[in-house]
Amino acid sequence: MSDTEVSVQVGSQPAEMSYQRRSPWASMMRRFRKNKRALVGFWMVVVFVSIAVFAQAIAPYDPIEQDMNVILQSPSADHPFGTDEYGRDILSRIIYGSQISLMIGIVGVLISVVVGVGLGTISGYFGGRTDMFIMRIMDIFMAFPSFLLALAIVSVLGPGMVNVMIAIGIFSVPTFARISRSAVISVKNKEFIEAAKSMGASHARVIFKHVLPNSVAPIIVLSTMRIATAILTASGLSFLGMGAQPPTPEWGAMLSTGREYLRTAPHVSTIPGLAIMFMVLAFNMLGDGLRDALDPKMKL
C-alpha cells in the first residue's frame, strides 16, 4: 500500500465516523433548523404557550370585569386592544382566551391520539376480520364532514367546553386510526419484528416496544396539524353558541358577539379573528416543518 493510499484512508476516517455517529434525531433537528417557515411556526407556538401559561401575570385587567364607562372604546393607551360591549378589556380576554383555545386543542387531540392510534394499531397489526371491522366503522365516521359531526355530537351532549373537547376527540379518531394503521402495516413485517416474535415476545410487547416507536413520526406530524383544526373547530362551535358560554373569554364567542358592532367598533370582532388566524397558522407551519424533517425522503 502506497503512502498516498494510506493518507487518503486516514484522512477520510473522521468524516465517515462523524456520519455514522449522527443519530436520526440529530438529522431530523438539522433539517428542521434549516426550514425557516417551521422555525417561525415553532416560535409563534412558543409565544402563544407562554402567553397562556403566564396569562394571570400578563393580563392588565380581569377578563370578565365590566366597566360601563368605557363601553366599545377604541384601542388606547389604557386598553391597547380596546373594550367590548360590556367595557371588558379585549387584550385581557385575548390573553386568557389563549388558555382555553390551547386546552381544547391539546385535550381534544389527545383523546383522538389515544383512541385512534389504539384502534389503528390493533387493526394494522392483527389484520383480517379485526381490520375490516374497525376500518368499516371508521369509514362511517369519515362519511360525515368533520365540523358537522362535531356539531351533531355537541348538539346531543349539550354546549360547553368539555363536550366540545369530546366532540373534537371523536371526529378526529378516524384520521388517526387510518394513519397509524398504515404506519403499523409498513413496520410489522420488518425483520426485527419477526425476530422479536421468534424469541417468544408477546403481542403487547411487540406492539409497545417495537411497532409503535417505529410508527410515531406520522402521528406526531398529524397531531400538530390536528391541534390547529381543533382550535378552528372549537372557535366555530363557540361562534354558533355551542361551545364556551358567556362570560368565558373564548375567541370564537368573542368573534360572534362582535358581529353586531362591525360598523361602529370593528376591533371587537377583528382582534379575536386575528388571534384565531395566527394560532392556527402557527401550528400548521410547525406541522409542515415536522413533516419535512421526519420524512425519510427529505434526508440530505
Image (cartoon, helix red, strand yellow):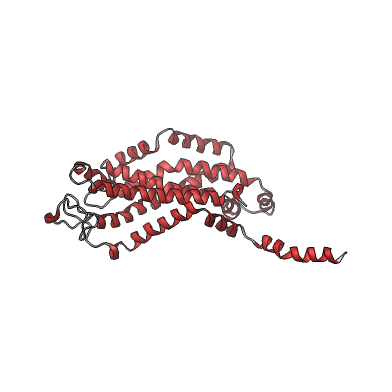
Q: Is residue 207 visible to the viewer in this orientation of the structure?
A: yes
The spot of residue 48 in percent (x, y) is 37, 57
Farthest residue toward the left? 69
Observer-nearest residue: 105 or 88? 88
The spot of residue 85 in percent (x, y) is 17, 49
Q: Is residue 239 above or below residue 46?
A: above
Q: Is residue 125 visible to the viewer in this orientation of the structure?
A: no
Observer-nearest residue: 265 or 24? 265
Viewed as shown, does residue 270 lie left or right of 25? left
Q: How many discs appear?
A: 0
Observer-nearest residue: 81 or 145? 81
The spot of residue 121 in percent (x, y) is 54, 46
Quadrant occupied by the N terminus:
bottom right
Viewed as shown, does residue 279 lie left or right of 286? left
Farthest residue toward the front? 4
Farthest residue toward the right? 1
